[in-house]
Amino acid sequence: MKYIVQISRVLVGVLFIISGFIKLDDPLGFSYKLEEYFGADVLNLEFLMPYALGISVIVVVYELILGVFLLIGYKPKFTIWSLLLMILFFTFLTFYSAYFDKVKDCGCFGDAVKLTPWGTFTKDVILLVLILILFVGIKYIKPIFKNLPTTIIALLSFVVSLWFGYHVLMHLPVIDFRAYAIGKNIQDQIAIPEDAAKPVSEYTWTFNVNGENQEFVTNGSYPKVDGEFIGVETKVIEEGYVPPIQDFTIESDGENHLDFFLNEDKLLIVTVYAIPKAEEQGLSKLKSFTDLAITKGYTVIGITASGPDDIEQLKQDYNLNFEFYSSDEKVVKTIVRSNPGVILFNKGTVTDKAHWNDFEDIEL
């Protein structure tokens, strides 16, 4: 039992540290995922949505330091009870999400690893079993150092985690796992290879045959049934290949200009996912920065999910000399974790990007 407990201790501790670090590297991204859970379609806790960012930081810091606490043996009873309560909550949440098909990706590992809803639930069940082993064998969990060093390491893990979370919020994620990371080519991220796996679906057709409803299952073809067609239900068996970028558009008057702009040698896109929510300090920097980019030969545009009235007001308030185009809010949030932010392209390849705090560090 002793060795099983120690193996479980290492597995749970390392997994919580990795999962916590990946999410802490991008707390804004995790907050967007929490907003999905808080929404009317899932938990119907919309009153929590304004606090999603604060909750995300607290949750991921707590997750990361619990992993550290477990590995070093700091306050075993507190640590294991905390782990147990956390995994019970998330196991329920992921089961609810998977069973009712509410959230496609839990965000457990940020954008680094994508899990299906049922894959996420399975992962949580395995963790629950491992934590129950720790709960039963808590007497075997001892500190690996003396009291003072253990306490110092525990305190440092908390302080460093808080500092790291603050740092990435004021700048950008240190490790960018998204499809818009520096060095990525957008056309490549959108394209579907010719040999890519095709989606596989199952179709359940309902017909009224001789006064009785009967179901016929096919892989897509219309069944030859002598009866009245009632309806059909589609179930995806295998999704097939899904490109990393699926819904990036740069629209104006109903026309998508994405291909045109991605062919530019020097393109700078200003991202403002929601103009009313943008940071005023960042907006005040846009004029001088974008004017300089224009003089350096860049094509400068903005993308936002806000409406034309907000766009016109923004351009007037800050005397901006470039046009804004429409794009999906979720996409704009994904491109740069800053509101506003900037991203530079050369023939569709991302060459640089920056939080509004770091506009001065961009070399044009």
Image: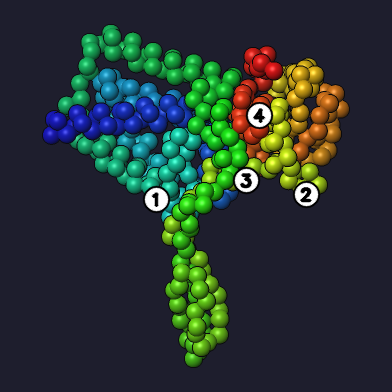
Q: Residue furthest top?
A: 148
Q: Which residue is depicted at the point 39% across and 13% down?
A: 156
Between circles 1 and 4, the one closer to the viewer is: 4
Residue position for label 4:
346
Q: Name the amino acid type tagged 4.
A: Asn
Other residues around mark 3 within 10 Å, as few (<14) / some (14–19) / many (≥20) = few
The mark that comes first in sequence, 3 or 4, is: 3
Measured in 3D between alpha carbons, the distance from the residue under mark 3 to the one under mark 1, in whole angstroms, is: 25 Å
Name the side, left or right, on which 340 lies relative to 216.
Answer: right
Q: Which residue is mark 2?
A: 254
- Give the CA distance from mark 2 to mark 1: 37 Å
Where residue 118 is drawn, which disc sits there?
1
- Residue at image location 37% in from the left, 23% down from the top: 65
Q: Amino acid at mark 3?
A: Asp
User: In the rendered structure, which disc, 3 or 2, sits on the residue that comes first in sequence?
Assistant: 3
Residue at mark 3: 247
Q: Is residue 157 above or below residue 188?
A: above
- Residue 18 rendering spot, x and y as whole percentages: 38, 28
Judge the density around disc 2: few (<14), some (14-19), many (≥20) Cα neighbours within 10 Å: few
Q: Total of numbered circles in the picture?
A: 4
Looking at the image, tell me whether mark 2 or mark 1 is earlier in sequence order.
Answer: 1
Q: Residue at x 52, y 48 (%)?
A: 193
